[in-house]
Amino acid sequence: MRYGLIGEKLGHSFSKDIHERIADYTFDLIPLSKEEFKEFMEKKEFAAINVTIPYKKDVIPYLDEMDEHAKAIGAVNTIVNQNGKLKGYNTDFTGFLYMVKKHNVHMEGKKVLIIGNGGASAAIQAVVRHEKAGKMVIVDVVTGNGAISYDEMFSSHLDAEIIINTSPIGMYPRIGNAPIDISMFHKCEAVMDVIYNPILTRLCFEAQEMDIKRVNGLEMLIAQAKQSVEFFLDKQIDDQIIDDIYQDMLKERCNIVLIGMPSAGKTTIGKMLEDRMQKEFIDLDDVIIEKAGKSIPEIFEESGEAGFRAIETEAAIEVSKLNNKIIATGGGTIKHKVNMDYLRQNGITIFIDRDVDKLISSDPNRPLSKSSDALQKMHAERLPLYQKYAAYVAVNNSDIESTVKEIEEAYHSILIDAVSD
């Protein structure tokens, strides 16, 4: 009898990885069409399953029993086959509550805005009520069933203190989207997003830029999976495993984005880190050349710097959606904020700092730094941007091996500081 996850589209699910870290069984991803879903549920040929979009409510008629959370929420994400009798649970409630408690998000007496009114939202609404929020406001593109319109939200609820996104807006691959402009909410003190890919959604990223507490959905996903496994195997598992898996998955999935002046050593350091950290190295210049079908000097000659920067932004957006990479950017990638906003959603930014007198000013592949004076001027202009975007500064003036070792050893603490509150 199999364990697995059923849903319609499961291509980017993390559930298999998480379940197989928690328990000693094979966990299958089982994509089902509407027709296949009916047959699957009727046959009951599984030991236990998780359920995701769009079947969290559709499974209910097939169940013999539901726990209290599932009944109250009206959605099921976990089913255990007990000798032919199907019992449904909702572990999203516990998963989200874990996230609320761990990050000290205090809802009591506060105005809480929930974006989205689907299956995931129902569990979050139950937690918000459990935490005694002063007022709960639900906004959705489809009004009714307790949800107001975005227009009404903008006119009456910009004083929300806690904002929770349960909609798919901002999910991979459309990581540049956000459901709202967080800067409009002048009393906002915490943002929570149930999305876990990218590591920081645009909503959470913008909250971080404004020094607002932000929490992404990966911990919720792991916490609810842990409780599902407890139901699957009928045994208790220590909560410490949630944080252990969270830390490991962050380290494995997060990109390292190297910024710095031309000839600062980004490519050399990136290739050395690739061997040590089991992360694939990508040179953004190579992506640009492939997209353009011509060399960088040729792009500058034919299209000028503006043409080059446009292709560079396309390349930056493309690689920002990847995971577990080491990305060496061009010296001027930091000049366009959009590049850095995208790259930091799935990555931590490390500034490779090198004294300007040690930089090379005669590389024909670097059209903007052809003389020592040009290099000095460029360094003065760009240094504030390198410092602004750096999560960490690694000085590369002498022994490059030491610089690489420093980055490798500092990676975990840099990562946790960059993506967690």
Image (tube, rainbow, N blue to C red):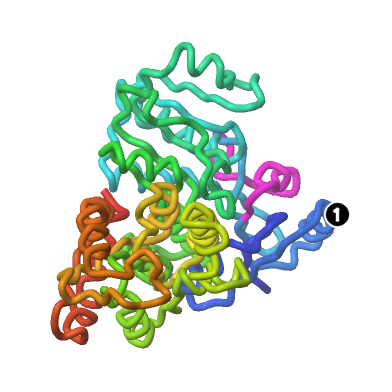
Between residue 267 and residue 109, name the one nearer to us. 267
Q: Determine the residue positioned at 79% across, 60% down.
A: 40
The residue tagged with tag 1: helix, strand or loop?
helix
Residue type for callout 1: Glu
Counting other residues with Cα less than 10 Å from the Cα at mark 1, is it few (<14), some (14-19), or many (20 or more)?
Answer: few
Occupied quadrant, residue 223: bottom left
Write the start and end of the magenta stretch as one range.
51-72
- Residue occupied by mark 1: 35
Between residue 50 and residue 389, name the one nearer to us. 389
Above/below status of 102 relative to 305:
above
Image location (x, y in percent) of residue 241: 34, 66
- Can I make out residue 200 in this image? yes
- Can I make out residue 317 in this image? no
Above/below status of 227 relative to 131:
below
Image location (x, y in percent) of residue 164: 44, 35
Image location (x, y in percent) of residue 363: 35, 77
Q: Determine the residue positioned at 30% across, 43% down.
A: 101
Between residue 237 and residue 416, name the one nearer to us. 416
